[in-house]
């Protein structure tokens, strides 16, 4: 056996050495081949290659180039800073800080808010430019970005109200200012108008500033080329182009959108463009970029600009000594977009049916009543509610207008003295009991809660005096503070609200930054126990 092993071991060793030698030869050969190829590449000649040269030719400037150069110097970057506000929790409720979305100012002559219409603000996002926490100035500090454009060499600038609303500090950077960490020049607010979302601000200057020309938005046509210039995502002097996609677009229903009839465009506009100009091919501003339709918080080809003709009228009012927009009102309520059956039954093709008249308002003094159908103003036919509001609002308070109307199938006319819209609404709130569009949805707009008078049977059964909570809008002040649907609000800030009229009067006086506390009773609970809900209204 030993002899056999002695013969096998040398043979096996020999075999192993042969395999190792073969493997080494293969590896060595591959390495040499690889080095050989590398060597060939390294030694390849490029003496026949021709170096590239930058040509001296220029592309002829087009209209977009010329307009960008012409308009750009007047377009500015706007930065705002909002400092943290002190907030306190309240017994019986829960408090959460929520950025308040801009909304239209109170409006007297307007349409009813249609239940079930939905909150269009869920779909139309305004351009706050992203509110960014500033770690250097405290956890609650927010920075916001927008755009604007100079219309007066003395430093007057047009932008959106929501760009500067609630800002503690406003800074403007010109296109000629150095690109540094400096936010820019300090600006101050001259005047704002929530109804059109327009604001005028001013910076001090020791020399005339470049300005932009204003165009006539009525002359713009669907299909016209337009250019948007602004600071999307802090990228200053960004130029995009598109066309006028549509005109006279209303994106928020009811009274809130009565003075917001936009130019729609597919020029790319994004957060930060807000307040910048929409320019025609003459280099004239025909709109102020204000809103977008988006499902991604970015550009999706649908943007909205406030027409320049509206902006000019608002601007002229805001730079006046009063620094406010004065609009006319006659003190009526009507419902927009009535079914065609109504016009057939009441035998009219165009016009507005009055659903309520404010006591003491110009319309009542002139003899108008609910059920009257307004068909003309100073002899001009009225198409619909928007037409009526635009015409009346443009009239100066104290002036007269002849209203043609139909009552019981007969044509009549009356001379009405135009009132100040703000004063008419203020008087309505003091008198209480009116169900104008603003009063109907004042609680919905400010608080996010819809209420109604307690049904007679429930009032008699429970002995309660207050208003019944019908609905609470998700994410609203009422929702965040836990107001329950089906509960009865009996007091707001210790003031009794025995009915809808009293509730509206109290709500109309609530102010942002102030405490709001509700006393709410559950009519189904034994003993009608009181619950307290409240927080600081933002």
Image (cartoon, rainbow, N blue to C red):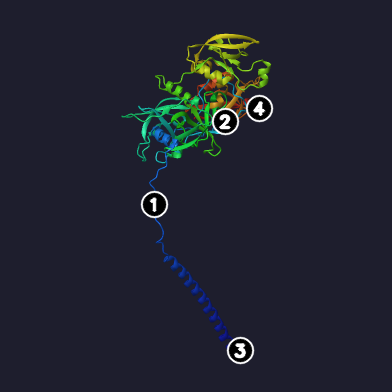
Q: Position of residue 120 (x, y in %)?
A: 57, 30
Residue located 51% across and 22% down the image: 106
- Where disc 1 sits, the SS reads loop
On the image, numbered disc 4 is attached to which residue? 524
Residue located 59% across and 14% down the image: 374
Query: Sequence order check: which comes first, mark 4 or mark 3?
Result: 3
- Where disc 2 sits, the SS reads helix
Q: Position of residue 68 (x, y in %)?
A: 42, 35
Query: Sequence order check: which comes first, mark 2 or mark 1?
Result: 1
On the image, numbered disc 2 is attached to which residue? 120
Q: CA distance from mark 1 to mark 4?
A: 86 Å
Q: CA distance from mark 3 to mark 1?
A: 82 Å
**Quadrant where the N terminus lies?**
bottom right
Q: Is residue 79 visible?
A: no
On the image, numbered disc 1 is attached to which residue? 53
Q: Nearer the viewer, residue 237 or 434?
A: 237
């Amino acid at each position: 056996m030993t002899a056999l092993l002695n013969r096998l071991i040398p043979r096996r060793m020999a075999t192993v050495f042969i395999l190792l030698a073969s493997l080494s030869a293969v590896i060595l050969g591959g390495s040499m081949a690889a080095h050989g190829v590398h060597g060939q590449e390294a030694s390849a000649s490029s003496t026949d290659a021709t170096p590239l040269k930058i040509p001296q030719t220029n592309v002829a400037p087009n209209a977009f180039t010329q307009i960008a150069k012409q308009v750009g110097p007047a377009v500015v970057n706007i930065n705002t800073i909002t400092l943290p506000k002190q907030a306190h929790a309240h017994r019986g409720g829960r408090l959460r800080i929520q950025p308040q979305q801009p909304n239209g100012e109170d409006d007297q002559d307007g349409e009813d808010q249609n239940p079930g219409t939905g909150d269009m603000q869920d779909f139309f996002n305004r351009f706050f430019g992203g509110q960014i926490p500033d770690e250097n100035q405290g956890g609650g500090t927010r920075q916001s970005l927008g755009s604007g454009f100079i219309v007066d060499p003395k430093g007057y600038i047009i932008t959106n109200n929501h760009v500067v609303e609630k800002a503690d500090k406003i800074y403007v950077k010109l296109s000629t200012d150095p690109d540094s960490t400096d936010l820019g020049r300090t600006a101050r607010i001259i005047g704002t108008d929530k109804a059109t979302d327009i604001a005028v601000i001013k910076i001090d200057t020791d020399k005339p500033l470049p300005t932009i020309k204003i165009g006539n938005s009525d002359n713009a046509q669907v299909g016209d080329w337009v250019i948007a210039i602004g600071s999307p995502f802090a990228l200053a002097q960004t130029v995009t182009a598109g066309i006028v996609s549509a005109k006279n677009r209303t994106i928020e229903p009811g009274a809130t959108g009565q003075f917001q009839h936009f130019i729609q465009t597919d020029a790319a506009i994004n957060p930060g463009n807000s307040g910048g100009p929409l320019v025609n091919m003459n280099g004239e501003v025909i709109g102020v970029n204000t809103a977008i339709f988006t499902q991604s918080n970015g550009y999706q080809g649908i943007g909205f600009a406030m027409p320049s003709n509206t902006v000019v009228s608002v601007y002229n009012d805001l730079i006046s000594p009063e620094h406010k927009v004065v609009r006319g009102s006659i003190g009526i309520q009507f419902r927009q977009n009535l079914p065609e059956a109504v016009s057939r039954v009441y035998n009219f093709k165009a016009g507005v049916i009055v659903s309520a008249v404010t006591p003491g308002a110009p319309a009542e003094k002139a003899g108008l009543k609910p059920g009257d159908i307004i068909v003309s103003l100073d002899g001009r036919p009225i198409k619909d509610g928007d037409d009526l509001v635009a015409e009346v609002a443009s009239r100066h308070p104290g002036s007269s207008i002849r209203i043609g109307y139909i009552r019981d199938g007969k044509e009549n006319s009356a001379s009405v003295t135009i009132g100040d819209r703000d004063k008419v609404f203020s008087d309505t709130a003091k008198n209480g009991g009116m169900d104008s569009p603003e009063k109907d949805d004042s609680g919905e707009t400010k608080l996010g809660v819809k209420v109604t008078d307690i049904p007679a049977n429930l009032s008699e059964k429970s002995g309660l005096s207050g208003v019944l909570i019908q609905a609470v809008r998700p994410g609203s002040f009422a929702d965040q503070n836990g107001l329950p649907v089906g509960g009865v609000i009996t007091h707001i800030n210790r003031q009794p609200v025995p009915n809808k009229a009293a509730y509206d009067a109290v709500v109309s006086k609530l102010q942002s930054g102030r405490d709001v506390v509700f006393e709410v009773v559950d009519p189904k609970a034994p003993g009608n126990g009181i619950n307290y809900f409240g927080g600081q209204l933002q």
